[in-house]
Amino acid sequence: MKKQFAVIGLGAFGETVALELMRLGNDVLGVDSNEETAERIADSLTQTVIADATDEEALEELDLQRFDAVLIAIGEHIEASTLCTMLVKSMGAKEIWVKAITSIHHRIAQKLGADRILHPEYEMGLRVAQSMAHPNMLDYISLGDSYFLIEIRPGEALENRPLTELKYDREKIHLLALKHGQELILQPDPDHRLRRNDHLVLVGDEDALRRFSEEL
Ligand code: ADP
């Protein structure tokens, strides 16, 4: 179902989010105080408005409570970002996402009632470090409390070997699926033999997953 989103601040991050929300089939209102920035993206969004997001009257005209979520992505401008968050909250927006750049910015956004606070550079930094340290780990999702879901590429030595030979702690890790090209095999049979380019999808304890990944 089509949702309605507003993205305030169309820098590299805001623009990427706005364009991807459009690609996913949603309506997006983009807001930026910089005329050139707003005009560059105008043809790609449902609606684009040039406005100062710290200007209460300008914000009121946008009727922000009609959106499913409002993202405030006013990059480096902490003061503008916090004032905008406060105004958007007081206007009764349903859900507010804020891009924060420092821990103080994070705490203020939290106090002002932001529902989700994002640190894209920090989060991306963690992902890149994980990929560099574990090159055979293709993707992961942190489930909190040291639990992870990971997609991993087993080494060539395991080609044609049955899943029973995989050396992981079966009390702490569960093999959910095998991915082979476009195909996803859920709960694969233990006698299934690994083929070239099979990926394993595992869930479980971080330390046990790390040990397994290092021994692969
Ligand atoms: P990023 O890290 O996403 O690239 P930037 O700082 O480059 O962040 O982008 C922030 C965007 O927010 C810029 O396009 C800028 O014009 C816009 N912006 C800054 N202050 C305001 C404001 N008061 N109202 C609306 N947009 C703003």
Image (cartoon, grey):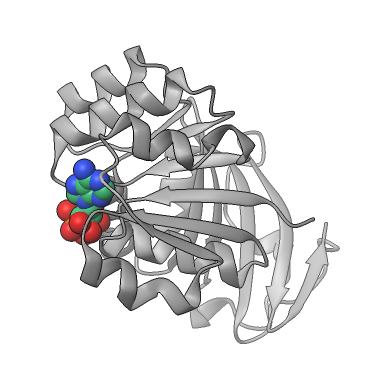
Left or right of residue 116, residue 180 in this image: right
At 19% across and 35% down in the image, what residue appears?
80
Query: In the image shown, does 87 or 131 lie closer to the viewer?
Result: 87
| Location of residue 199 by image quarter | bottom right
Residue at 46%, 30% (x, y): give it.
146
In the image, residue 126 above or below residue 54: below
x, y percentage for residue 161? 68, 76
Picture quadrant of residue 132: bottom left
- At which x and y percent is residue 73? 31, 47
Q: Can see residue 12?
A: yes
Residue 60 percent across, percent down from the top left:
44, 33
Q: Quadrant of the N terminus?
A: bottom right
Identify the residue at horizontal 48%, vertical 76% (top origin): 44
* In the image: residue 113, left or right of residue 123: right
Q: Which residue lies furthest to the top in this view?
A: 111
Residue 126 in picture, x, y percent from top left: 28, 49
The image quarter containing residue 192 is bottom right
Q: Can residue 125 be seen in this view?
A: no
How many numbered dots are placed on residues in this image? Answer: 0
Give the answer, above or below, for where 26 lies relative to 53.
below
Q: Going by the image, does 106 lie left or right of 89? A: left
Whether 16 is drawn above or below 141: the answer is: below
Task: Please report the residue visible at 24 percent of the width from the left and 54 percent of the height from the top.
Answer: 33
Asked if residue 128 is positioned above or below residue 117 in the image, the reply reads below
